[in-house]
Image (cartoon, rainbow, N blue to C red):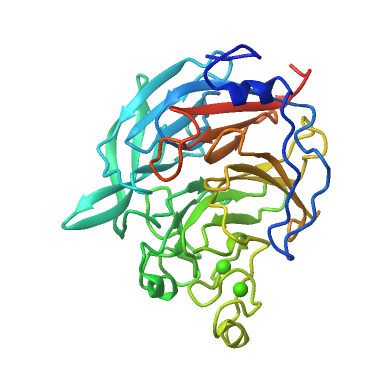
Amino acid sequence: MRTRCTPTPAAILVMTACGVVASPAVVRATPQQAAPSTPNPAAGLLVETLASGLDTPWDLAWGPDGAIWFTERAGRVSRVDPETGAITVVAEIAVHERGEAGLMGMAFHPDFEQEPYVYLAHSYAAGNGIENRLIRMRYEGGRLTARETLVDGIPGRGNHDGSRLVVGPDGFLYMTMGDAGNRPAAQDLGSLSGKVLRLTLDGARAPGNPFGTRVYSYGHRNPQGIVFNPETGDLYVAEHGPSTNDEVMRVTMGGDHGWPSVHGFCDGDVADEEDYCDDNDVVEPLEVWTPTVGISGLDYYGSDRIPGWNGSLLATSLRGAALWRLQLSEDGRSVVSTDVIYRGDYGRLRDVLVSPDGEVYIATSNEDGRGQPASDDDRILKITRRGVS
Ligand SMILES: [Ca+2]
Ligand SMILES: [Ca+2]
């Protein structure tokens, strides 16, 4: 279901979709944050509702069938036709939904035509607590079937469950995992908590991993976004900080990304941080947000469809209710400018997806029970260049 500048209950959306409301001026969050590149980054953009009536959509993924697939936290997996907005439910999975836990990340087998596997990460109740697992299911006859558990027993909690998935250019599956509230576990190479994992498509440790385990990088707090740069092969992760220092980082194999001793940069804003940085080879982030904005989903924009956006990362934020654009340097190793495309217009934003032809989709998260809802349902919104069909 789409709306084009027609009155709906989401008046604020319509106002922006019709170009009445300009995006607020960019506010520098920290001195380290890169400067904005344009005064009104939303100029010339059109926002439409692709799907509404959703409940906490968590992951958006462009399907091999040309549909947008999405998870909802309570356990539903659906496909939405990007032209008509028609939604088809393909699975309802029993999960433990609480706070940040539930059905989360999704990815497709890279050879989906021959191996129609969909990978999913979800929380489940275990004993008195919560654990996380990676599963895969086959897409047959319009439904997901033949559920297989690939990795389970990963420590979980009502928050800090990570669980974003992506298949890398090397054909292996990368999975983010939060510290589940156990800070030292992020530095414990024997634990899967607070890590980026690199797995075969059967869920085993991938060959060439730095420690001979499933661990690819460590020192992560609660990574909620992951994407590869298709130009350079670099891997980027977005991660929630405590009350300061949300981070976007370039993840390196075997790298210590600092948590819990280092928050954001090695700049001494927490006790003993600089000593830790002197003694350890810490990978500092590319960008930080202080105070935190709940930086969440991440995708790479590699198209000329929206002028000036090629070669940037797009990131959503929950509490900050914003869509961010981080312009990367040509080598992809630094952020040269930061724009807020929308802030406060649509409420909490969980995930962002760039389509193969350069259209942008974002998922709201107003029904997640973790903030003041900005609307009474969640939506998938489509952002495109005004006047371009
Ligand atoms: Ca870090
Ligand atoms: Ca710091």
The quadrant where residue 147 appears: top left
- 147 lies left or right of 72: left
Q: Is residue 224 above or below residue 45?
A: below
Tell which of 118 and 219 is nearer to you: 219
The quadrant where residue 130 appears: bottom left
- 120 lies left or right of 16: left
Q: Is residue 356 above or below residue 201?
A: above
Q: Could you tell me which residue is drawn at 55 percent across and 23 percent down?
A: 66
Location of the C terminus (image quadrant): top right
The quadrant where residue 190 appears: bottom left
Q: Could you tell me which residue is drawn at 77 percent across and 38 percent down?
A: 41
Tell which of 12 and 276 is nearer to you: 12
Total numbered circles: 0
In the rendered image, is residue 151 in sight?
Answer: no
Taking the image in four quarters, ligand 2 sits in the one at bottom right
- Where residue 265 appears, as percent x and y from the top left, is 64, 71
Q: Is residue 2 above or below residue 206?
A: above
- Where residue 6 appears, as percent x and y from the top left, is 62, 11
In the rendered image, is residue 300 in sight?
Answer: yes
- Where residue 329 appears, as percent x and y from the top left, is 79, 55
Q: Is residue 169 above or below residue 357?
A: below
Q: Could you tell me which residue is drawn at 82 percent across and 34 percent down?
A: 307
- Where residue 267 appears, as percent x and y from the top left, is 66, 77
- 175 lies left or right of 342: left
Tell which of 127 and 216 is nearer to you: 127
